[in-house]
Amino acid sequence: MKLWISDTKTPTHRLVKLHAEQHSSYEYLGDLDEIELKKFLLELQNDMDVTKNIKLLNYYGYLHLFIKET
């Protein structure tokens, strides 16, 4: 799956937006297979429900993640 990413970091949180279509302000992340995508999501947050988020990304074509920094 070809993905584009927008990644905004602050001291308290991180907002990661993934899209399956090109957007002007997003950077190309790459053409990831399911294994690579799982590894990427777990690097963002190790206790994430990866299967659910991959299903959402496949269904809607985008996934927005709000991650609290600890």
Image (cartoon, rainbow, N blue to C red):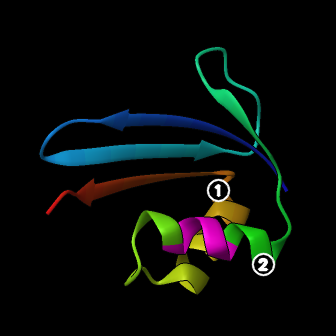
**46 above or below 60?**
below
- State the image quarter where residue 45 is shown: bottom left
Q: What span is in magenta? A: 38-42
**19 above or below 34?**
above
Choose the circle earlier in sequence order: 1 or 2. Answer: 2
Picture coordinates of residue 40 (x, y %)? 61, 65
Q: Which residue is depicted at the point 80% across and 75% down?
A: 34
Could you tell me the amino acid type at mark 2?
Answer: Ile
Q: Nearer the viewer, mark 1 or mark 2?
A: 2
Circles 1 and 2, Cβ within 8 Å, touching? The answer is no
The residue carrying pointer 1 sits among few (fewer than 14), some (14 to 19) or many (20 or more) residues within 10 Å by Cα, namely: few
Magenta stretch holds residue 22: no
Picture coordinates of residue 23 (x, y %)? 67, 23
Q: Nearer the viewer, residue 61 or 44?
A: 44
Q: Secondary structure at mark 1?
A: helix
Q: Which residue is mark 1?
A: 60
**68 above or below 18?**
below
Q: Which residue is mark 2?
A: 35
**62 above or below 44?**
above
Could you tell me the amino acid type at mark 1?
Answer: Tyr
Please give the count of numbered marks on the rendered protein.
Answer: 2
Q: Nearer the viewer, residue 56 or 66?
A: 66
Picture coordinates of residue 21 (x, y %)? 76, 36
Q: Describe residue 66's horizontal placement relative to residue 30 as left or right.
A: left
Which of the image's four quarters has the N terminus?
bottom right
Work out how far the residue at label 1 is from the one at label 2, CA to CA, in angstroms.
19 Å
- State the image quarter where residue 3 is shown: top right
Q: Which residue is depicted at the point 70% across and 67% down?
A: 37
